[in-house]
Image (cartoon, rainbow, N blue to C red):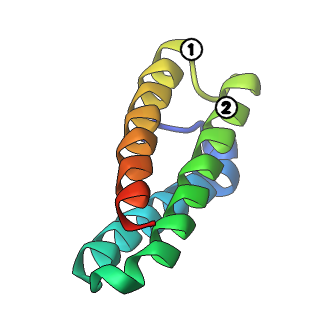
Amino acid sequence: MPSFPKKDRYTLGQKCELLLLDVIEDIITASATPKQAKLPILKKLSIEVDLLKVLFRLGKDLRIIDDKKYLVLEEKLQEIGRMLGGWIRTHA
């Protein structure tokens, strides 16, 4: 998670932080859920990851996140998205 300037910390930064916590919570929930009930959780998780991508892109466009940090974040989110896509295909 990048460090946000003070003026952005309680807006975009807080939203990203809360969403990241939701993603972690949903990953743990999905891993502990029986196979037949995983799909709705995984789809919600996919939406949360997509929203994180948009918020981090917004942070980059507003110059809150520098390009180097954005590229690292985007690469990690892409990898998470690929793993999540495989998990969804397994349970669809």
Amino acid marked by disc 2: Arg
Pointer 2 local density, CA inside 10 Å: few below 14, some 14–19, many at least 20: some
Up the image or down, 9 lies above or below 40; here it is above
In the image, is 72 to the left or to the right of 62?
left
Answer whether residue 53 is visible to the viewer in this image.
Answer: yes
**Residue 10 falls in which quadrant of the image?**
bottom right
**Residue 55 falls in which quadrant of the image?**
top right
Residues 29 and 67: in front is: 29
Q: SS class of the residue under badge 1? A: helix
In the image, is 43 to the left or to the right of 73?
right
Residue 3 is tagged as none
Task: From the image, tell me which residue sits under label 2.
Answer: 57
Outermost residue on the left side: it is 32
Residue 28 position within the rendered picture, expressed as x and y whole percent measured from the top left: 28, 72
Residue at image coords 67%, 31%: 57
Up the image or down, 72 lies above or below 50; here it is above
Up the image or down, 44 lies above or below 87; here it is below
Amino acid marked by disc 1: Asp
- The numbered mark, 1 or 2, whose residue comes first in the sequence reads 2
Residues 73 and 5: in front is: 73
Q: SS class of the residue under badge 2? A: helix
| Quarter of the figure with the N terminus | top left
Residue 4 position within the rendered picture, expressed as x and y whole percent measured from the top left: 55, 38
In the image, is 80 to the left or to the right of 17?
left
Up the image or down, 91 lies above or below 8; here it is below
Residue at image coords 50%, 63%: 45
Answer whether residue 14 is visible to the viewer in this image.
Answer: no
Residues 13 and 38: in front is: 38
Residue at image coords 65%, 51%: 51
Task: From the image, tell me which residue sits under label 1.
Answer: 67
Q: Marks 1 and 2, how far apart in space?
A: 10 Å
